[in-house]
Amino acid sequence: MALATVVETWGSAPRPVGSNLVIDNDGNFLGSVSGGCVEGAVVTEAMDVIDSGKPKMLEFGVADEAAWNVGLSCGGTIRVYVEKVT
Amino acid sequence: MKLDILHALNAERAARRAVVIVTDVASGEQRLVKAADMARDPLKETVEKRLRMAKSGMEETAQGRVFLTVHVPSPQLVITGAVHISQTLAPVGQLLGYDVTIVDPRTAFASIERFPDVKVIAEWPDVALPPLNVDHYTAFVALTHDPKIDDPALKHALARDCFYIGALGSKKTHAKRVARLKEAGLSDADIARIHAPIGLPIGAVSPAEIAVAIMGEITQRLRMKSEKAEAA
């Protein structure tokens, strides 16, 4: 199991600092760190964290053409801390 | 997060006690600081400040960057009166994340058939309220229209510093209530904390609409600074 937490936000962010997403080993998740824009990417990264046991800091910014599926459409930037629950 | 920290966190939350988790985001090191142990913590001032604001956030410290996850008790909603309005107010409150309890000594009202999914206590407020740990994270709503039930409960809510206190009744009913509470020795400042007529002025008519007006006003109190809420 992994726990993802919004630790910093700049500009307009969909979920406030402290918001959580919990991810299990099968990729099932509960909660949210954005309005659904970056959850998919966080779940993928969480799989790595569960494997390695090492926490990760992720950053998501404004969506651009190339990476629209892992950007925030609202124009803000968020930093998400992902840690394994052991 | 280590499981023992998670278990300790859940225990504190269940007991309605504030707790802060300090995470070193570089190393992943973590510790749990209970409200009672805060004074002995190396980051005491930072932790205390965050807890006061009830806001999680990143902090720069001499030891590096740490993230403080602040857990204050989840808000609870305590209602006197197992009445028609409560039948909608309770589920709406639950949807918004409140632990809801209804107190009404009249067993004809406080029945499980009328409130299948809510904690209902068929006792007088002096018996029912003390074990509920009514605190600053509690919204209190008086809906019975019966001074024998509502007045002692309102006094309890004021003494426990509820973040929201509301009482159902017209301006005329409330004027009588104010007179009774003054007679009982309550200060003007205390009495002024009671929201009456209750709820945001949205022209609510049906019991469900009144429930929405009440939860709107409670949300406003919870989320907006008082000056802003007054101006709104």
Image (cartoon, coloured by chain):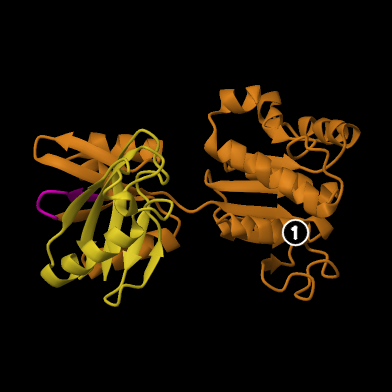
Q: A44 above or below A18? A: below
The chain assigned the colour orange in the figure is B
Q: B202 above or below B22? A: above
Res A10 visible: yes
Residue visible at 33% across and 50% down? Answer: A68
Residue type, label 1 = Thr
Residue A73 in the figure: left or right of residue B65: right
Q: Residue under circle 1?
A: B88
The chain assigned the colour yellow in the figure is A
Q: Which residues are magenta?
A: B22-28
Chain of the residue under the numbered disc 1 shown in the image: B
Q: Position of residue B213 (x, y in %)?
A: 73, 43
Residue visible at 83% across and 59% down? Answer: B84
Can residue B119 be found in the magenta stretch? Answer: no
Q: Secondary structure at mark 1?
A: helix
Q: Position of residue A21 (x, y in %)?
A: 35, 60
Q: Which picture quadrant has residue B198?
A: top right
Dividing the image into 4 quarters, which one contains the N terminus of chain B? bottom left
Neighbour class for label 1 at 10 Å: few (<14), some, many (≥20)?
A: some
Q: Position of residue A26 (x, y in %)?
A: 29, 77
Residue B40 in the figure: left or right of residue B79: left
Q: Which picture quadrant has residue B126?
A: bottom right
Residue visible at 83% across and 38% down? Answer: B203
